[in-house]
Amino acid sequence: MALVEIQGLTKYYGKQRGIRDVSFDIKEGEIFGFIGPNGAGKSTTIRILLNFIYPSSGKAAVFGKDAARDSLDIRKNIGYLPSEVYYYDDMKVSELLRFSYAFYKKGSPKRMKELADRLDLNLNKRIEDLSFGNKKKVGIIQALLHQPKLLILDEPTGGLDPLIRSAFFELLKEENERGATIFFSSHILSEVQSMCSRVAIIKEGELIKVETIENLIRNQFKKVTITFSGQKGKTFKIEGGRKPEWSGDTLQLLYGGEIKNMLQMLNETEVKDLLIEEPSLDEVFMHYYEH
């Protein structure tokens, strides 16, 4: 069952491009990645889902309900963490969080304290005294307090140190095991690769690929490292190779053709060592952005 359905979403800001004809769905219970650099259209898509802005065309549905018409009802079961958080500076953290979960009637002081302890956040500090990273912790707790059915996270780890980032990912896994669906938007590909089952790649406002992480890495390219033992290797070129990089007598590249064809080409030169492995998501992503 699709918890989120997006069909042909397009948004223009005057003559400026936002997103064009974006379509994908998010299945109930999955952790879905949304990747692209800043300005690619990730936040625009999320803001339409949350009914913060209206699309120029297309439609979006959450929980089977229209994202615009039924937005008040939808938001009762959504936890949202924006890329940048802004709060009332003169409030204490505990005051702000109590104010927040009162809207949902699902949170509790106990859960607030548990989450604050997990993220090492002082509940008695005023918002104005918090660093950017600690303000992000407040946003994380605010999104998780009411145990929502859908978590929408827009660049969620900015400002978090490695230990807190690890604790945050553990919390997300626990929420997912509880049954929450997670929409994880980020430009940090290693995080998406470790957390998500499927991913959508967006480029300059247009969706260019929706695929499982496993298939995206396995079926597209192999990472090939070749060490040559003779001068002939310096002029060697592999048809179907991408992003060749030399280091001494060693050539590293992405190869998108048949392995047997590559081996036949290598048979014509002097090879000292050969390593064939799966590429990282970063390497696959850069291929899509360059081509």
Image (tube, rainbow, N blue to C red):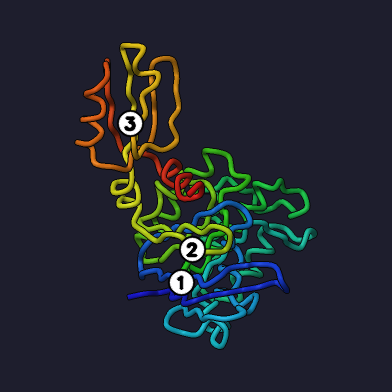
Q: Which residue is mark 2?
A: 207
CA separation in Å, label 1 and label 3: 34 Å
Q: Which residue is mark 1?
A: 23
Q: Is residue 165 above or below residue 3?
A: above
In this rendering, would 147 be left or right of 278? right
Q: Residue at x 21, y 24 (%)?
A: 267
* Secondary structure state at the residue bearing disc 2: strand
State which quarter of the image contains the N terminus: bottom left
Circles 2 and 1, Cβ within 8 Å, touching? The answer is yes
Disc 2 crowd, CA 10 A, few/some/many (<14, 14-19, 20+): many
Q: Nearer the viewer, residue 248 or 49?
A: 248
- What percent of the width, then of the height, locates residue 264? 21, 30
Task: Return the disc, 1 or 3, that comes first in the chain's sequence.
Answer: 1
CA separation in Å, label 2 and label 3: 28 Å
Q: Is residue 198 above or below residue 251?
A: below
Q: Nearer the viewer, residue 29 or 277?
A: 277
Amino acid type of the residue that numbered disc 1 sits on in the rendered structure = Ser
Q: Which residue is mark 3?
A: 224
* Secondary structure state at the residue bearing disc 1: strand
Q: Is residue 191 above or below residue 203?
A: above
- What percent of the width, then of the height, locates residue 194? 40, 46
Outermost residue, right side: 90
* Secondary structure state at the residue bearing disc 3: strand
